[in-house]
Amino acid sequence: MNNIEPLIEFKDVSKIYHMGDETIRAADHISFKIYKGEFIAIVGQSGSGKSTCMNIIGCLDVPSEGEYFLGGNNVGKMNTDQLAEIRNKMLGFIFQQYNLLPKLNLEENVEVPLMYAGVPKAKRKELAMKSLEGVGLAEKANHLPNQLSGGQQQRVSIARALAGTPSVILADEPTGALDSKTGREVLKILQSLHKKGNTIVLITHDNSIAATAQRIIRLEDGHVVYDGPSDNPDAFVHSEFGLHAGDGGEEE
Ligand SMILES: Nc1ncnc2c1ncn2[C@@H]1O[C@H](COP(=O)(O)OP(=O)(O)OP(=O)(O)O)[C@@H](O)[C@H]1O
Ligand SMILES: [Mg+2]
């Protein structure tokens, strides 16, 4: 597997923020490679640098130092337009708060990223319906988001993320707003997408959710402190206190 090109590569990436005299390294010399078909969870406590990494992976931000390659493209060298283009072409986003547009029906919501990607109207509709079918919500295509439960809304947002067949699905705390049963259903969908060959990067502070991934990258203070399989108990040890935090749901 190591002789194929990684889909995502962080090469000594740092993100530095200046706050007055203070310098914060939100990401501090981070390196990792993610290959096609992997299901990875990036975990860590509040302030460890998860969102910072997510924003860079998602081409919403660029590194201050080091290099980020997505599909072999050096993202750090791109301007805003190029970032938007690679984002539309390669990435599908799933957010904690679904981010569905309230005045658009489900089918129209799923069409939105396809519109940005320049897909013609008729094709958009076809892809959106197919994607809604995939999450079992085709028969509600004409409903508005607020006519659905939270879990159903998150399934729509999964359909939206998948509609353009992205290379990578980025999910930031996708179960954060759901009760645990509905959250498990959403995780099952992510697992089945992984089985179908999709590449998934899941961001979460919750170890029990991270455990559904294949591989864990654990961050502490902007550093990678673990990168390996999720079935290794070390994946869930917090190095500072040596605790096994397997219960999940802990908030800082
Ligand atoms: N725009 C910014 N300006 C200054 N400091 C920032 C900025 N964004 C993040 N930071 C700092 O960088 C560090 C990492 O933040 P980040 O948001 O990546 O953490 P996180 O792991 O996503 O936390 P959470 O679980 O609370 O979402 C924190 O110390 C944070 O205060
Ligand atoms: Mg965050």
Image (cartoon, rainbow, N blue to C red):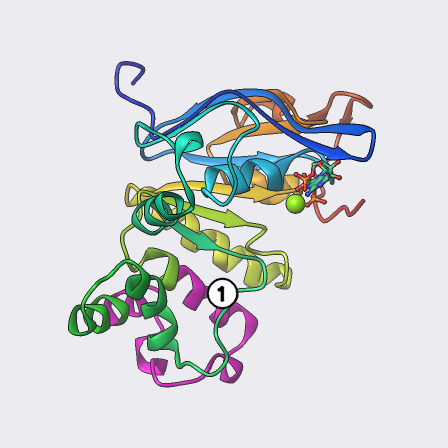
Left or right: where 162 falls relative to 103: left
Residue at (61% x, 42% y) in the render: 51
| Residue type highlighted by circle 1 | Gln
Please state the horizontal and vertical placement of residue 148, each as a whole percent of the image.
50, 79
Instruction: Find numbered disc 1 in the image and state the secondary structure of the residue it sits on.
Output: helix
Residue at (45% x, 84% y) in the render: 144
Please state the horizontal and vertical placement of residue 172, each as a whole percent of the image.
55, 49
| Residue stretch rendered in magenta on the structure | 129-158
Left or right: where 125 falls relative to 2: left
Q: How crowded is mark 1: few (under 14 residues within 10 Å), some or many (20 or more)?
A: many
- 139, 231: nearer the viewer: 139
Left or right: where 106 falls relative to 19: left
Q: Give above or below for 119 relative to 236.
A: below
Please state the horizontal and vertical placement of residue 7, each as a whole percent of the image.
34, 30
Quadrant of the image occupied by residue 231: top right
* Disc 1: which residue: 154
Left or right: where 222 falls relative to 68: right
- 95, 244: nearer the viewer: 95
Q: Give above or below for 55 relative to 148.
A: above
- 70, 158: nearer the viewer: 70
Please state the horizontal and vertical placement of residue 109, each as a whole percent of the image.
39, 72
Dominant secondary structure of the residues highlighted in magenta in the image = helix
Q: Give above or below for 172 relative to 201.
A: below
- 148, 114: nearer the viewer: 114
Q: Give above or below for 80 relative to 131.
A: above
Quadrant of the image occupied by residue 240: top right
